Amino acid sequence: MVLVAGSLGGCGTAQDDGTTQEQEAAADLFTDRDVSGDYDPAACIAIALSGTEAVCDDPSVVISDGVVTVTQEGVYLLTGNFEGMIRVEASSQDKVQLVLDGVDIHNGTNAAVYAGEADKLFLTLAEGSENSLSSDSYQPIDDHNVDGVIFSRCDLTINGQGSLDIQTQEGNGVVSKDDLVIGGGAVTVTAGGHGLEGKDSVRVRTGELTVTSGKDGIHADNDSEEDKGFVYVAGGQIRITAGDDGVNATGDLTVAGGSLELTAADDGLHSDRTTTVSEGQVEIADACEGIEGNHVVISGGQIRMNVSDDGLNGADGSGEGFMAAGAFGASDSSVTISGGSVYITAGGDGIDSNGDLTVTGGEIYVSGPENGANGALDYGGTGEIRGGVLVAAGASQMAMNFGTSSTQGSLLTQVDKCPEGSQVELLDAQGNVLVRFTAEHSFDSVVVSCPQLEQGETYTLKAGDGEIQIVMEDLICGTGSGMPFGQGGRGGFRGREDFDGELPEDFQGNPREGFDGERPEGFQGNPREDFDGELPEGFQGNPREDFDGELPEDFRGNPPEGFDGELPEDFQGNPPEGFDGELPEGFQGNPPEGL
């Protein structure tokens, strides 16, 4: 995939003093102590661990029945191995720093590290040290639920220059009921639940983070306070393999730097509010949907994704798909791209906004759906392009161009069917190549927009072995052959609400609400709510809520919440919370809590 017209990659907006908005935001979110991990070994209170015993000669540390309790502010240096719990019970104004230097702590019945009360807990990984924490199961403490290897009721920071391995087959890896900060170190989490969870926020400043989780890789959940429940990535290297979302926030989700490599059963990045990528690298190797939020904002960075459903999805949560907001209405959701580079390979819509789609800059390349029930571009409100470079190749039935309120030229044309790996080139009248793109999927429709497109000029579009001469009679050339939607247009079969016809062979898209027809063999999309028909053999998608039909043999998805049917033999997914049925022989997933 090569852009010939010039690089349009975005970066953070510079302030008068040379800093960027992202740098200013990061300064407010991370303290110097979050990042430094400094301590004086000679001034530390030493805690020596050995088996089920521990030794400390400072009165601020109480040791009893396999529990080492820190009761006052200070810096504590821990060494050795331990079967039990490290507990913090200080005052609400105290900052406690636990330095782990070659520590191996396992608790078979509860959290390995538990902070009941303090102002803030720092877990510092000593330089060059290798540390491990693990738990088998969990019990309430003081009538409070505990469900993580590291569980803190106060702000929690992990920093330093050592490594930390966290493991649990049940529950979560790291939990903070306030703010969770990763300020350094190499942290590896393997958890049956969420990898990292912060109620008010999860903030990553630097370090290496590797997460394998049965639920979300990173999870922030506080829907009762408007400015809470957010995730902010300012840097670091993050690798996540998740049984649900890679990163999930009820508040905003911001990637302002760093590198993320994500594999997820559901969304790569998901926010109930605004999902923003302004800098850094995001690679979504495999997911159902790539980047989702009520508002999706791309202003910089490098993004690549390979997903089975939508690539970028602006959805307000009221429903799914183009018609979610009403028969012909649009929601207040949006997708806005002003910079960066975005490469999308999608089985569903490449870019899908229930509301407006606005492009003012950046480089966007879409290998869209091969099935006719989805489009490379899909929006329910206004579609405008005012800058940048975009090439979107996909199926012609749902093809959609930008609307007439755009100030930059855009052309949509149908081409002869081109196999995957075919090249698209746009040339001006002098034969200069303006845009060149290699599609990852087969296609018979192309949308192209770049700054050089001008009304009245003639261009040549090469697609595979064919070429078409196009005269730009209008700034927006080509609106599909079907009924107009928003200010653009589309043609052919929609596959949206009320559709109950026959889906084509090897269809991998997502039928909309109300569809109760027959799914073809090999279908891998996601049936919508109210569907109670029969899923085909080999189905790997995720049935929606209220589905109570029979799961096919070799089903690899995740049954929805409330499902209490029979799981097929060799089921490898994750039963939902509340499931109280029988787990089949050969089950390899994660049992829900309470089972």
Image (tube, rainbow, N blue to C red):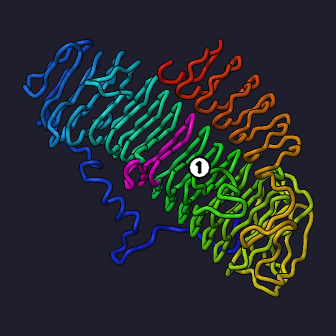
**Left or right: residue 242 compared with residue 349:** left
Q: Where are the magenta residues, as a range?
A: 224-252
Q: Nearer the viewer, residue 453 or 289?
A: 289
Instruction: Determine whether the residue tagged by mark 1 lies in a helix, strand or loop.
Output: strand
Q: Amino acid at mark 1?
A: Glu
Q: What x and y, as percent, mark residue 13? A: 45, 71
Q: Is residue 279 visible?
A: yes
Q: Is residue 441 visible?
A: no
Q: Residue at x 88, y 61 (%)?
A: 464
**Left or right: residue 117 compared with residue 469:** left
Rendered image quadrant of residue 186: top left
Look at the picture and state if 247 lies above or below 575.
below
Look at the picture and state if 543 lies above or below 102.
below
Q: What x and y, as percent, mark residue 120? A: 23, 42
Q: Residue at x 67, y 36 (%)?
A: 542
**Left or right: residue 368 compared with residue 48:** right
Q: Which residue was labeled with disc 1?
A: 283
Q: What x and y, as percent, mark residue 554? A: 74, 24
Residue 347 falls within the magenta-colored stretch: no
Residue 246 falls within the magenta-colored stretch: yes
Q: What x and y, as percent, mark residue 556? A: 69, 29
